[in-house]
Image: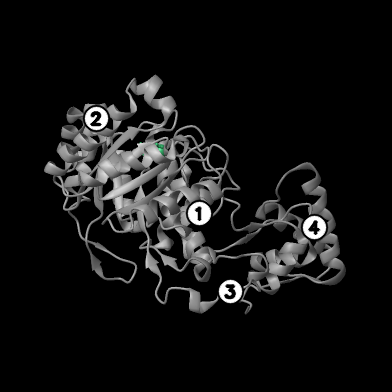
Amino acid sequence: MKASRDNLPVPNPSLQPTKPELVRIFDTTLRDGEQSPGVSLTADAKLQIAEQLAKLGVDVIEAGFPVSSPGDMSGVQKIAKSVGQAKRTNKHGLIADPPGIAAMARASRADIDSAWRGVRDAIYPRIHIVLATSDIHMEYKLRKTRPEVIEMARSSVAYARNLCNDVEFSPEDATRSDRDYLVQVLEAAVEAGATTLNIPDTVGYATPEEYGALIGFIHHHFASANVTVSAHCHDDLGLATANTLAGLANGARQVEGTINGIGERAGNACMTETVMALRTRAPLFSLETNIITKEIWRTSKLVSDLTGMVVQPNKAIVGANAFAHQAGIHQDGMLKNKRTYEIMDPSDVGVSESSLVLGKLSGRNALRSKLEKLGYHVEGEKLDQVSIRVKQVLDIQRAVSDLQLHEICAEVFRSTNAAVAY
Ligand code: KIV
Ligand code: ZN
């Protein structure tokens, strides 16, 4: 087997599709993401986020759950009328269609009517019906029998299809549902006209092997039906992105996720992690998305500001430290060749450049480079002296500011003319 640029084995090219297949990105920041404890978005804030999601290039925006409140209905309608009708620029710089606008409904006529009123003004409206299929949900939450739930799936999808050409069906808690029964419910939904079968790991319970196997099974079972299989994963065990990728490897061609991974409990799959995994490991997956990755950082920041959900510094792709290096050995490598410690170019996700953070473990090369940026060319003994002072500061505080570096340089160079400021 050949080795790739990164010295990892490249899959046999003759086993790979010649052209990457497209994966549809379904963003549910405004529905599942808004279910994060403590988050509530006004209709205007939702609209602002939806506009940015359209710029990011998502294929479908799930704008909300209209039956839940008049405010949510109003937000969904505003999005359908504006973002859902506006042309946009795609990743090739060409004029492209607006995103699809989806709204969630339970399997009842009142919910479906509300969802339809929410999205009907969009050019590509979608009704998303959710109905639980695990025994525990059917017995305790729905208080319905298995045959009753099959009938609910059939009648609700048929009702929605009379209103809208695009109907997504989600068997809630699919990963804890009896597989044979799950397939019977999905068959009823497909017969009634469902266009997407979304398979939620509602409680973040599945492992990648299990989730991949479930998606593979459903993909093969419905291979001759004209439906898209979709992955929808939660992060209760920290496996949401891994499970989503396992779903893609086994035939899912739509993925659902949120910006910054916000959502119920531990959150949803972080959409940008999936997107950047597909891009960074392109030969492995041979799948592509319509996402304009340079918009990722801006989108993350907007969602964090408007929801008040702070992004943890070490979060993949969008965390403040995602492209920051502090250890001397790493900084030395970075100064010689960025690919020693970075698998993605920060500018690809909209971060201007990686940063070398001066900390206790930083080395002379990083310090020299930082001083150069501040206008000091320092070598030899003088560099040692600056380094000693910097470490004294870092013993008592976490970071050294530019001002402190100027002061240290001034002190060290005061007695001599060894520093060349330029
Ligand atoms: O996690 C879940 O089951 C959901 C469904 C509503 C799709 O969010
Ligand atoms: Zn969910």
Residue ID for mark 1: 246
Mark identifier at residue 10: 3
Estimate the spatial distance between the alpha carbons at disc 2 and disc 1, rounded to whole Å: 37 Å
Question: Who's the residue at 57% across and 42% down the image?
Answer: 238
Of the residues under marks 4 and 1, which one precedes in the sequence? Answer: 1
Badge 1 density bin: few <14, some 14–19, many ≥20, Cα 10 Å: many
Specify the quadrant of the image occupied by residue 45.
top left
Question: Who's the residue at 22% across and 61% down the image?
Answer: 97
Asked if residue 343 lies left or right of residue 148, the reply is right
4 vs 3, front mark: 3
**Residue 287 place in picture, x, y as percent:** 43, 65
Specify the quadrant of the image occupied by residue 20.
bottom left
Of the residues under marks 4 and 2, which one precedes in the sequence? Answer: 2
Label 3 element class: loop
Estimate the spatial distance between the alpha carbons at disc 4 and disc 2, rounded to whole Å: 61 Å
Name which residue type carries label 4.
Glu
Of the residues under marks 2 and 1, which one precedes in the sequence? Answer: 2
Asked if residue 298 lies left or right of residue 9, the reply is left
Name the image quarter holding the C terminus: bottom right
Give the number of callouts.
4
Cβ of mark 1 under 8 Å from ligand 1: the answer is: no
Q: Quadrant of ligand 1?
A: top left
